[in-house]
Image (cartoon, rainbow, N blue to C red):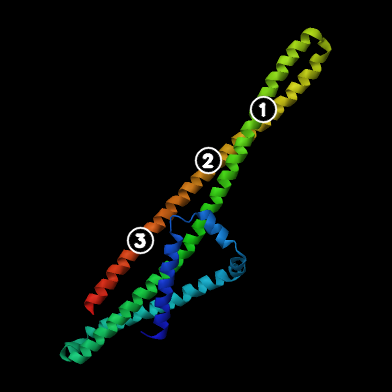
Amino acid sequence: MTLQWTVVAFFLYVEMAVILILCLPFISAKRWRSFFKLSIWTWFSSYWNKGFFTMILVLMLLFCDALREVRKYSSAEAGPMGESKLNPNLFDHLHMKLFRSQRNLYISGFSLFLWVVMQRLVTLINQVAVATVTGISLQTQAENANEAARRFQEENLLLKKTRLDEEKDKASSKQQLRREAEKLMEELKVAEDAVQKANIEMEAMKRQARGLTKEYDRLMTEHSQLQQEHARAGDGSKKDQ
């Protein structure tokens, strides 16, 4: 294996290890987000987009080169007059070249795919963490708003009772109590509107979190299938060799 394909194979192994670590169930999305907020990642994020697309370009070039080699040696093996079959040494040489080119094709193809999957997985982890934090914050706001609404209702009932009692004694205080009751009703309406808005936002974030969780599970399933296909492809290649 040449130096460039050794580097690509090592890069593929690193990708598999990173994705496996990201998929560990006992590490929550909030912890990953805290890890990604470290200063070193903040500095690295300014170069991430350029590095990401550069690596995609390099892997695509290597994939196309490996595909060209596979087609080249496949056509050479099935050449005119079956020359490779008449010459055993030439046949073995072409077969070895074809095997290596197919191996390089698998390595570069899986490296390219896992590179995109890893980037998408990191994005989904961040989105799930943000949705979780936002959901908790909205839930806290909704609980506070519900508590405020309940307190306002109790105060409103108390004021209404006080107003009725004072009406019997002092008719002059009726207008003042009415203004206070109207003010409290307005505050209660504002609180109820805030509660309704908070509940709507919380439901939207929950739906988004469920969608992100489904997308995360789908990516994990695709990753497991790809690992199985890679393992089967590796076994098939060993058998062909």
Name the one closer to the observer, 124 or 26: 26
Name the one closer to the observer, 162 or 96: 162
Q: What amino acid type is highlighted by mark number 2? A: Glu
Q: Marks 1 and 2, Cα distance to the nearest angstrom?
A: 24 Å
At which x and y percent is residue 113? 41, 68
Mark nearest the camera among 1 and 3 is 1
Question: Callout 3: few (<14), some (14-19), or many (20+) C-alpha neighbours within 10 Å?
Answer: few
Q: Are marks 3 and 2 in contact (CB under 8 Å)?
A: no
Q: What amino acid type is highlighted by mark number 3? A: Ser
**Secondary structure found at label 1:** helix
Give the residue furthest to the right: 172
Q: Are marks 1 and 3 in contact (CB under 8 Å)?
A: no
Of labels 1 and 2, earlier in sequence is 1
Q: Quadrant of residue 70?
A: bottom left
Query: Residue at (50%, 61%) from the top-left corner?
Result: 122
Of labels 3 and 2, earlier in sequence is 2
Q: Which mark is residue 203?
A: 2
Residue 126 seen: no
Where 239 falls versus 178 (above or below)? below
Q: Marks 1 and 3, Cα distance to the nearest angstrom?
A: 53 Å
Q: What amino acid type is highlighted by mark number 1? A: Arg
Where 203 falls versus 59 (above or below)? above
Query: Residue at (17%, 87%) from the top-left corner?
Result: 85
At which x and y percent is residue 120? 48, 61
**Secondary structure found at label 2:** helix
Q: Are marks 1 and 2 in contact (CB under 8 Å)?
A: no
Q: Which mark is residue 151?
A: 1
Residue 82 left/right relative to 59: left
Where 206 falls versus 24 (above or below)? above
Q: Which residue carries the number 3 mark?
A: 224
**Secondary structure found at label 3:** helix
